């Protein structure tokens, strides 16, 4: 039988059956290069969606012959991927932080004022106008600002904007009044700045900052909802459809679940619980939550701090501070007790471990309670510095490495000072980790890093920063292949959250979450990856973002 015969036979069948028999579906997308990220990493050019799920994936001829769609989308030859999944971020914190105007990188006081006006327009109901990140050293004249303009523009709204280092803040008269700060307020360990005439300038330094900051109220439920939805808007604009939010309490989760039930928050969430007494009491008793858009089946534990501040717990002293090794944040006994408690439950244990000492400790404790290969999908978050001897434990005890490639390219400038050249080779070792477990889950840790998952994709494959430095890549032996980096932010991220049977790839039965880009992530030159534009983002067959 040849192709022509098959084609003719197919035509005959469709003529006989007629258009009426085509199966009705909600959506058909065609004329695309679709990276399905299925097990064979196969490509397609069209798919059909019904009730929020993919029902067929193939060529346009196959899909259009079989389905009658309510909505047809011509992708105009663009590139489609499963919706991007950030496997480790702090969405709640990020979204609530949006009430602060972002003043990082402002180049003049006038620009700060302009940004504050924009912020006020966006959140007119907020009780306070707050911002962070200004640095007068970046402005012409390098003078500290004064409150005059803020008093004129915002006479009835308290304004509080903190300097980039957190040690100084500028506030307006309304804020000073609310805090009861006058020229006569006593202060030690700080300064309430006055001008030559003895009037308050609004600049507060060190302890004086707290006199006003303590008066800023927590956002109300309505404010929080507005901020969470604004956060969602920014996420879908960069192609994110699923997030793992690391470290939440029941109240935060309930708040987001309510927005989901109202149909407003469409992002799919996997929330890691803080291991507080209240969270454990409630969730260990009631068991994990597996809903369409909400998964609660893990606890987020902190083993140590960060490398930059020398809080990461190392086996040997810091190269640049030979008397320091960092420290654990709890006792070894506490980690072991918690591991046993969680092993007896249906929950995952996801532990933040940066240093090689904390990684070793947690891998060993995981090993003790899990004993060998298993499908509990316990995770090490970051797995940043892992001694060569410990690497195999990820395979041995089936422990998921949850990594953030932009950390490698943000830290590479100074990580060698902390660790020394030899130890640096065991850091940010994503390929070695991937070889052990067979997968890595990829996240960004936003708002610590940028929310754009393509920055992480670029960092993972090119091991370069936004300026393509270093030219030959940082420790390229630990770069990920492009297919693996894409798996890490789709299907492997879903696996790490027990959601791989529901989403993460474009194949029948999976949630119809997908993103349309103008760039072929598998073929484009690496310097084009960060700039790839998201054209459309869809969750459960519903368009949630459309670019220009
Ligand atoms: Zn984090």
Image: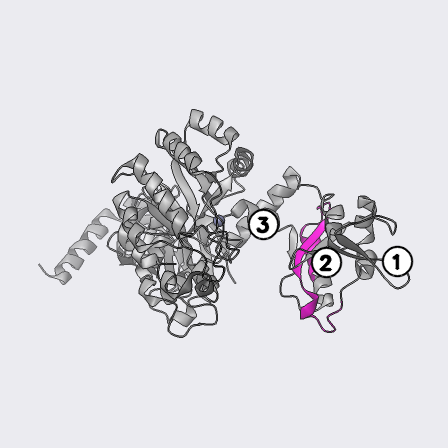
Check if residue 129 falls in the magenta segment.
yes
- Residue 511 visible in the displayed image: no
Asked if the residue at tag 3 contacts the one at tag 2, i.e. Cβ–Cβ closer than 8 Å, the answer is no
Residue 230 — which label? Answer: 3
Residue 534's spot in the image, x, y percent? 46, 60
**Secondary structure state at the residue bearing disc 3:** helix
Viewer-nearest of discs 2 and 1: 1
Label 1 beta carbon less than 8 Å to ligand 1? no
**Is 344 left or right of 139, judged from the image as shown?**
left
Along the polypeptide, which appears first: circle 2 or circle 3?
2
Q: How far separated are the C-alphas under marks 2 and 1?
A: 25 Å
Identity of the residue drawn at 33% across and 42% down: 364
Q: Which residue is mark 2?
A: 117
Q: Residues within 10 Å of mark 2 (few under 14, many from 20)?
A: some
Magenta residue span: 115-143
Q: Residues within 10 Å of mark 1 (few under 14, many from 20)?
A: few
Extreme-right residue of the structure: 197
Label of residue 399 in the image: none
Q: Is mark 2 within 8 Å of ligand 1?
A: no
Disc 1 target residue: 199
- Locate residue 90, reporting x and y percent: 51, 47
- Residue 478: which quarter of the image? bottom left
Residue at the location (13% across, 59% down)?
A: 5
Tell me whether circle 2 and circle 1 mark residues in contact (CB < 8 Å): no
Residue lying farthest top?
285
Spatial CA span between label 3 and label 1: 39 Å
Q: Earlier in the sequence, mark 2 or mark 1?
A: 2
**Residue 319 place in picture, x, y as percent:** 45, 61
Q: Nearer the viewer, mark 3 or mark 1?
A: 1
């Amino acid at each position: 039988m040849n192709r022509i015969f098959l084609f003719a036979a197919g035509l005959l069948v469709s003529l006989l059956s007629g258009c009426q028999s085509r199966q009705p579906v909600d959506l058909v997308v065609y004329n695309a290069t679709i990276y399905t990220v299925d097990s064979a990493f196969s490509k397609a050019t069209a798919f059909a969606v019904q009730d929020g799920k993919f029902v067929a994936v193939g060529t346009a001829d196959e899909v259009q012959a079989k389905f009658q769609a309510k909505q047809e989308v011509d992708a105009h030859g663009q590139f489609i991927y499963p919706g991007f999944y950030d496997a480790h971020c702090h969405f709640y914190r990020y979204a609530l932080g949006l009430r602060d105007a972002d003043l990082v990188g402002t180049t003049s006081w006038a620009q700060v004022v302009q940004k504050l006006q924009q912020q006020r327009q966006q959140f007119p109901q907020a009780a306070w106008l707050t911002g962070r990140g200004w640095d007068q050293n970046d402005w012409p004249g390098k003078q500290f600002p004064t409150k005059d303009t803020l008093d004129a523009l915002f006479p009835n709204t308290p304004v509080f904007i903190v300097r980039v280092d957190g040690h100084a803040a500028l506030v307006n008269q309304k804020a000073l009044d609310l805090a009861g700060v006058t020229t006569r307020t006593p202060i030690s360990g700080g300064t309430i700045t006055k001008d030559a005439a003895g009037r308050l300038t609004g600049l507060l330094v060190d302890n004086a900052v707290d006199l006003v900051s303590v008066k800023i109220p927590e956002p109300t439920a309505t404010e929080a909802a507005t901020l969470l939805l604004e956060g969602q808007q920014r996420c879908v604009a960069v192609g994110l459809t699923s997030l793992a939010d690391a470290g939440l309490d029941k109240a935060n989760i309930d708040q987001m679940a309510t927005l989901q039930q109202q149909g407003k928050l469409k992002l799919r969430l996997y929330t890691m619980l803080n291991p507080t007494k209240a969270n454990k009491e409630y969730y260990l008793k009631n068991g994990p939550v597996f809903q369409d858009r909400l998964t609660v089946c893990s606890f987020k534990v902190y083993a140590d701090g960060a490398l930059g501040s020398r809080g990461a717990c190392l086996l040997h002293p810091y190269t640049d501070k030979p008397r320091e090794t960092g420290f654990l944040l709890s006792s070894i006994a506490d980690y072991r007790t918690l591991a046993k408690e969680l092993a007896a439950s249906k929950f995952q244990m996801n532990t933040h471990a940066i240093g090689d000492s904390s990684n070793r400790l947690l891998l060993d404790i995981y090993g003790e309670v899990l004993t060998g290969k298993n499908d509990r999908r316990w995770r090490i978050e970051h797995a940043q510095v892992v001694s060569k001897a410990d690497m195999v434990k990820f395979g041995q005890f089936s422990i998921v490495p949850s990594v953030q490639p932009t950390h490698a390219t943000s830290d590479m400038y100074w990580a060698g000072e902390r660790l020394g050249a030899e130890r640096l080779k065991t850091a940010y070792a994503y390929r070695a980790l991937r070889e052990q477990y067979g997968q890595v889950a990829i996240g960004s840790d936003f708002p610590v890093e940028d929310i754009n998952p393509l920055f992480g994709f670029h960092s993972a494959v090119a091991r370069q920063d936004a300026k393509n430095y270093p030219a030959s890549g940082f420790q390229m032996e630990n770069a990920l292949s492009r297919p693996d980096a894409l798996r890490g932010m789709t299907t492997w991220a879903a696996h790490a959250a027990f959601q791989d049977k529901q989403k993460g790839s474009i194949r029948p039965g999976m949630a119809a979450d997908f993103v349309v880009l103008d760039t072929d992530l598998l073929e484009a030159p690496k310097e084009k990856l960060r700039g790839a534009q998201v054209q459309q983002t869809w969750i459960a067959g519903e368009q949630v973002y459309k670019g220009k």
